[in-house]
Image (cartoon, helix red, strand yellow):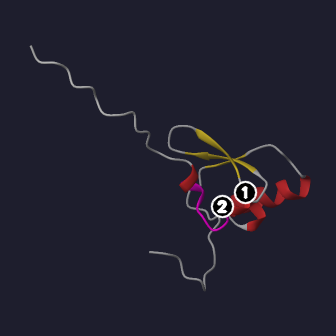
């Protein structure tokens, strides 16, 4: 279920503060976040971020095409390692 347009986008408050601080200081250091449900806004464009995927942090450079998507969409939590090989029965 999507969020109401009346409410606007959702960005975790401390993440929003870190983004605004990084914009003002022109910092290239990545912003670490666990907030996968936050929406990427135009203020995020050009920043380097690290999104937690449950095990480690996934690096991400935010581009203009990512605006409107959630951060968790770009840090996958599951890795497919292929099906197990079938052993030959004796």
- Asked if the stretch drawn in magenta spans residue 55, the answer is no
Q: Which residues are magenta?
A: 67-72
- Residue 24 lies left or right of residue 68; in this view the side is right
Identify which residue is drawn at 28% across, 29% down: 84
| Residue bearing the label numbered 2 | 66
Circles 2, 1 touching at the beta carbon (< 8 Å): yes
Q: CA distance from mark 2 to mark 1?
A: 6 Å
Within-10-Å neighbours for mark 2: few <14, some 14–19, many 20+: some
- Residue 62 lies left or right of residue 56; in this view the side is right
Q: Position of residue 76 (x, y in %)?
A: 50, 47
Most frequent secondary structure within the magenta stretch = loop
Residue placed most toward the observer, 73 or 27:
73
Residue placed most toward the observer, 86 or 28:
86
Establish if 14 lies above or below 59. below
Q: Position of residue 59 (x, y in %)?
A: 66, 42
- Residue 23 lies left or right of residue 61; in this view the side is right
State which quarter of the image contains the N terminus: bottom left
Q: Residue furthest bottom?
A: 6
Label 1 element class? loop
Residue placed most toward the observer, 76 or 15:
76
Residue placed most toward the observer, 5 or 84:
84
Label 2 element class? helix
State which quarter of the image contains the C terminus: top left
Establish if 34 lies above or below 12. above
| Residue bearing the label numbered 1 | 63
Identify which residue is drawn at 56% across, 48% down: 75
């Amino acid at each position: 279920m999507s969020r109401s347009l009346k409410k606007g986008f959702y960005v975790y408050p401390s993440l929003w503060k870190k983004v605004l601080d990084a914009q003002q200081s022109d910092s290239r250091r990545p912003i670490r976040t666990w907030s996968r449900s936050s929406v990427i806004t135009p203020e995020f464009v050009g920043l380097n971020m690290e999104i937690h995927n449950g095990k480690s942090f996934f690096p991400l450079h935010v581009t203009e095409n990512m605006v409107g998507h959630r951060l968790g969409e770009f840090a996958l939590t599951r890795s497919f390692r292929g099906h197990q090989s079938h052993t030959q029965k004796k």
